Amino acid sequence: MEVTAITHKKNPIFAATVVGKPPLEDKYFGWATERIFLPLLKPITPDLIDYNMPENGVFHNLVLVKMEKKYPAHAKQFMHAFWGVGQMSFVKQAYLGKRGMLQSLRLSGVYKVYLR
């Protein structure tokens, strides 16, 4: 691919990016928002260890969560907390696992766990 021109407007009405099917440039925005919002989600869900929104899930349809499970139905409480936080309300599928269960939060790791 060869870039021949980049255009812009001096005073844009709405700054946005237009993307096609993944993976494209929006995957870097998705990865950045994961890392930016992790410290902001921890006060709401203190037992949160890490989370990942894979680009295959288009960053808002699928979330993989590693948590410190302390009691039955703790994962259900986590999911309700996630659904109450802005754009996380669009999550359609969530895999929540305790510390030892999900070694890697990448999508291939989830397949290994659930196909056992």
Image (cartoon, helix red, strand yellow):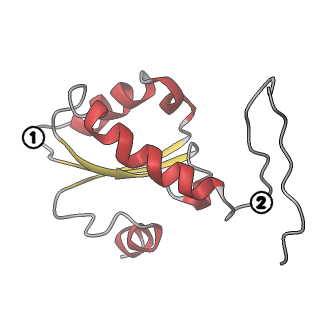
The C terminus sits in image quarter: bottom left
Which residue, as the protein is rendered here, is positioned at the far left? 70
Q: Is residue 97 left or right of residue 89?
A: left
Q: Is residue 73 left or right of residue 53?
A: left
Which residue, as the protein is rendered here, is positioned at the far right? 4
Task: Report x, y in % for residue 18.
Answer: 79, 46
Q: SS of the residue at dot 1?
A: loop
Tell me if residue 77 comes above or below residue 1 in the rendering.
Answer: above
Task: Report x, y in % for residue 111.
Answer: 44, 71
Task: Report x, y in % for residue 86.
Answer: 49, 23
Q: SS of the residue at dot 2?
A: loop
- Give the number of callouts: 2
Within the image, what quadrant is residue 104 found in? bottom left
What residue is at 59 percent from the left and 54 percent from the top? 57
Within the image, what quadrant is residue 102 found in? bottom left
| Residue bearing mark 1 | 70
Category of crowding for the residue at label 2, using alpha-carbon neighbours closer than 10 angstroms: few (below 14), some (14–19), many (at least 20): few
What residue is at 45 percent from the left and 74 percent from the top? 108
Identify the amino acid type marked 1: Lys
Tell me if residue 6 comes above or below residue 92 in the rendering.
Answer: below
Nearest to the observer: residue 109 or residue 32: 32
What residue is at 58 percent from the left and 45 percent from the top? 61
| Residue bearing mark 2 | 21
**Mark seen at residue 9:** none
Task: Report x, y in % for residue 40.
Answer: 30, 31
Identify the amino acid type marked 2: Lys
